[in-house]
Amino acid sequence: MTLPKTPSFRLDGKRALVTGGSRGIGLGCAVALAEAGAHVVIAARGHEQVDRAAAEIAKAGFSAEGVALDVTDLGAAAALFDAQGPFDILVNSAGLARHSKTLDTTPEDFDAVSEINVKAAYFLAQTAAKQMIGRGGSIIQISSQMGHVGGLDRAVYCSTKHAVEGMTKAMAIDLGPENIRVNTICPTFILTDLTRATFDDPQKREWIDSKIKLPRVGQVEDIMGACVFLASDASGLVTGTSILVDGGWTAG
């Protein structure tokens, strides 16, 4: 009998681009990929932040560098791919949330959130995919549980994340013949510096705790394994789908 062999979770020799990778979930993904052996390029708007994040990863003994990038500048994004690519892995963690009640949403907020969460996400994936032709690759969008359900004061945010889920499925169909896999990771509320104000609000914290079925809230570390899985050969037949890291929020 020949036993099956578990596909590798290692990423040695791979190059990964992580946008929004200087803090929070993006930083967690960058660290996870670097720990698995990839060379990680961290891209975010703040030059000082990306350099610091890359330096800390390198200090820990892994391979990373930082590049300043505004993902809404499609020309700058294309130039980054030309200069640094091709990448085997794209993790798009850049995103924006401006929450408001449906009746209070302004066109300016709608456009700002859509520009980053939908348009930039689409064209980052497109640019990465063009370089992956003939070599394959993994595109991972950091979406949200709010791409599968609705939420209080989140009509705009939910609409953008539902859009990401839709584009991911369609891109997976288009790019599958090229062995390019496209998936999303959909976190629940993850405790970070950016979300701390939400967790500190007693009414919002009660809402979060009532929805998460496990007896704790999400941590950045909860996302890291899912990212390595989707980036590696261990998920070789996984495309066009979502990993919901939501503590059971969307279960009902």
Image (cartoon, rainbow, N blue to C red):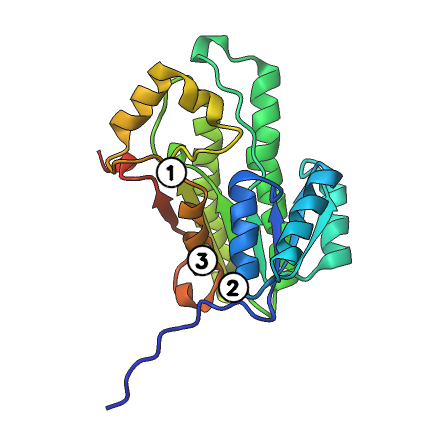
Q: Residues within 10 Å of mark 1 (few under 14, many from 20)?
A: some
Nearest to N terminus: mark 2 or mark 1: 2
Residue 72, by quadrant, is top right
Dot 3 lies on which element? helix
> In the drawing, what numbered circle is on residue 218?
1
**Residue 61 appears left or right of 4:** right
Residue 154 visible, this orientation: no
Residue placed at 56% from the left, 45% from the top? 27
Location of residue 248 in the rendering, given as x and y in whole percent from the top left corner = 26, 39
Report how far apart the C-alphas of labels 2 and 3 lie in the structure: 12 Å
Residue 216 in percent (x, y) is at 30, 36
Q: Earlier in the sequence, mark 2 or mark 3?
A: 2
Q: Amino acid at mark 2?
A: Ala
| SS of the residue under disc 1 | loop
In this image, 95 relative to 130: left or right?
left
Mark 3 — residue? 230
